Image: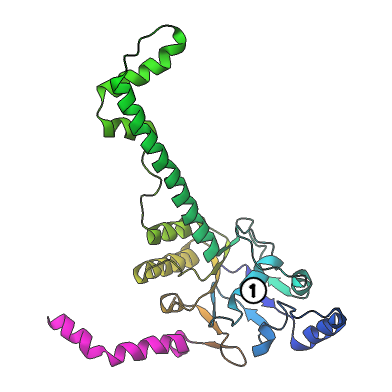
Amino acid sequence: MIYLDSFRFPDEEAEAGYCMGVKRRCYTSFYPFRILTRHQFERIDCESVTILYGGNGSGKSTALHVIAQKLALSRESAFNMTSFYEDYVGMCSAELRVPVPRESCIITSDDVFDYMLRIRDLNEGIDSRREEMFEEYIEAKRSGFQLRSMDDFEELKRVNRARKRTQSRYVREELGMNVRTYSNGESAFRYFTNKIGENALYLLDEPENSLSPARQMELAQFIEDSARFMGCQFVISTHSPFLLALRGAKIYDLDSDPVDVRRWTQLENVRAYYDFFRRHEQAFERTYDD
């Protein structure tokens, strides 16, 4: 499914005219102006999966955030907005094939990190409470508590439960298990699969962060299936070879000048991996022989 058909950024002439108009204010940075025009990146024509590839500072995340802001997509984490951001977004234009569903959103690596930190903080709170529960258990087991009024009824039940159970069972039933039952990589992967639903546009900013190669391949398969069968469209910024290899993806190489559409096997980052493993091919063969 395609919701966003194309997106246009200000060209160099439009940027120059704007920056000249505010030059007298002595600003040292006009971000996000002058980022994408360095390599003449002015337009994206989207497919069901569109990828923005490039190294650090190439502008791929900037482009993704600008698109999200222009389309008013929901987001969780804050991002770098300068005094010029809204003016820049106002100079952009989007062509929609159909209206963007309300469930559409941008998901950043900060969102995933924040999610894992919240889980950790919650579990630390639970762990702290667990220590208190152990103390309560010992106290209740040793207690000579007796019922004196109906106000003491709940306390009596707690004491009786403690007397009848082992320490570990008492704490487990009173407190519950920790929220964290998965590794960081598994939690990150589940964040994406829980966040991405049906029939919506999703912008993913470097989703490979926190994911092992195996999890990246699982995410790639999940994205392919969501695009093919669940009515989803994706615009992704990444330099992960596992995501760059997504079937049918249209890839914009922001490291080229001017920006151009390329096959994933032509990209410098992927070629570096390929050349590295070819140089060490015999080492892998010896490993299999062993």
Amino acid type, label 1: Asp
| Residue 38 position in % (x across, y down) | 67, 88
Residue beneath the point at 59% across and 81% down: 57
The correct choice, above or below, for 216 with respect to 154 in the image is below
- What percent of the width, then of the height, locates residue 111? 54, 60
Question: Which residue is depicted at the point 78% across and 75% down?
Answer: 91
Is residue 190 visible in the rendered structure shown here?
yes
13 relative position to 201: left or right: right
Residue 152 or residue 233, whichever sits in front:
152
Q: Magenta residues, as a range? A: 263-290
Q: Residues within 10 Å of mark 1 (few under 14, many from 20)?
A: some
Dominant secondary-structure state across the stretch colored magenta = helix
**Res 184 → quadrant:** bottom left
Q: Nearer the viewer, residue 145 or 193?
A: 145
- The spot of residue 81 in percent (x, y) is 70, 68
Residue 149 versus residue 281: which sits nearer the camera? Answer: 149
Local SS, label 1: strand
Give the residue pinned by disc 1. 5
Q: Quadrant of the C terminus?
A: bottom left
In this rendering, the answer to whether 264 lies above or below 91 is below
Q: Relative to 79, is 229 on the left or the right?
A: left
Depicted 123 relative to depicted 279: above or below:
above
Q: Is residue 284 magenta?
A: yes
What's the residue at 67%, 62% (across, down)?
Answer: 99
Residue 8 located within the stretch drawn in magenta: no
Mark yes or no: residue 173 visible: no
The residue at 59%/74% (across/down) is 61
